[in-house]
Structure formats: structure tokens, C-alpha cells
Image (tube, rainbow, N blue to C red):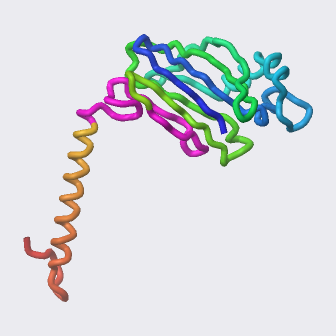
Amino acid sequence: MTHSRVTIEPSGEVAYALQVSSSDLSEALALPSHRAATVREIRTGEDRLFEYFLARLRIEADGAPCPIERRGAGNVEDTEIKAELRFVGRCSAKARAVDIVYDVFFDHDPQHMGILELTHAGNKAHFEFTSSARRYRVDRLAAAPGQRPLEVAGLAALLLATAAITTKGWLVRRRRKPEGVAGRAPN
């Protein structure tokens, strides 16, 4: 499991910090066997780590890729050793939608999960990347990250309610149809 902390700024800057367990770094660091990386290997392998993970992570604004700038790497030690990669996506401040596209480890482990903690306009959202959910979209005009703008959400709710009422009415009319009588049921 990986952990991503992302902050989307009004300027369009997307600050990203990715934490990966040292036990999941053997391929990225080209270690001779599948084992946990040491703190030294994490520190000296910074270029390899960025190359590996930035090939599998994208930040997009309105469908266009945002340029990525590396901000540094290090290790975090809590209950286990983790590598932490920090980078920034330079997206347009005018972009309405910002997507985080995550394609890490799914080719080797379809059960892998990436935890996303996203902050935008003072609101926080949490999301789990899985092999079937690799993209998280933030509508920057929405009330909270990952939501549609209120006017769109209200319209969608109205359309769904109308469809439900129409379908219910159709089902009720079908049930009233007398047995053995062909044709339409009376209204």
C-alpha cells in the first residue's frame, strides 16, 4: 500500500508527496532480490525512484498533462521505513478539472491499493486507488474535492428523481392491465 498526500493550490500548483514502503522498492531500485530497501539505498536511489514512480503517476488539468518538478526525496521512519518522493505539478490556474492518475504496482499486484488524501480549498477528501479505480478527478468549482458543482449536482438529482417517478408511473400502469386483455391499460 502507498500513501499520497496531495494539495491543490488556487495558483494551479499541485503539491504531491508519495510514501512507499521500503519492502515495495526492490523493482524501482533494481535490487538483486525482492527484499526491503535500506535507508542508504533509498537515499542513493533517488533518481531511480523518481524515474520509476513518475512514469506511473500523472497529474492532468482539463485533460492535458501538467509539467512535473521534483522537490526532493527522503525516508520516513515510523513503524517501518518508507521512501517519500515530493514533486509538484504545474497546472493552469484556469483549469476546471484536475485529475490524479495513479498506475503504481497494478501490473504486479492487482490487489494493490493506494491511499489518497487530497486537500483543495480548505476541504479534505480521501480516496482509494485500485486496479479498477486509477483516476481521481477534482472539479475546482465544486463545493468539496471530488464533487460536482452544486448546480450540476442539483440538476442531476432532479433528472434522477424525474426518471424514477416516470418509471414508477409506467410500472403502475402496466400492473393495472386486466388479465387476458390485449393492448394498453387504461390511463
- Check the image and report above or below for 185 versus 34: below
- Quadrant of image for the C terminus: bottom left
Q: In terms of image quadrants, where is residue 109?
A: top right
As drawn, the residue found furthest toward the right would be: 32
The residue sitting at 23% across, 33% down in the picture is 151
Left/right of residue 181 with respect to residue 75 in the rendered view: left
The residue sitting at 61% across, 11% down in the picture is 69
Q: How many marks?
A: 0
- Seen from the viewer's position, the closer of residues 1 and 158 is 1
The residue sitting at 56% across, 38% down in the picture is 134
Left/right of residue 72 with respect to residue 158 in the rendered view: right
Q: In terms of image quadrants, where is residue 20?
A: top right
- Check the image and report above or below for 59 versus 33: above
Whether residue 129 is in magenta: the answer is: yes
- Check the image and report above or below for 102 versus 170: above
Residue 49 drawn at (x, y percent): 75, 22
Residue 142 drawn at (x, y percent): 33, 29
- Check the image and report above or below for 145 versus 65: below
As drawn, the residue found furthest toward the front would be: 78
Q: Which residues are magenta?
A: 125-152
Q: In terms of image quadrants, where is residue 153?
A: top left
Left/right of residue 129 with respect to residue 185 in the rendered view: right
Whether residue 103 is in magenta: the answer is: no
As drawn, the residue found furthest toward the left would be: 187
- Seen from the viewer's position, the closer of residues 150 and 118 is 118
- Quadrant of image for the N terminus: top right
Left/right of residue 156 with respect to residue 134 in the rendered view: left
Residue 35 drawn at (x, y percent): 86, 36
The residue sitting at 17% across, 65% down in the picture is 169
Residue 24 drawn at (x, y percent): 76, 35
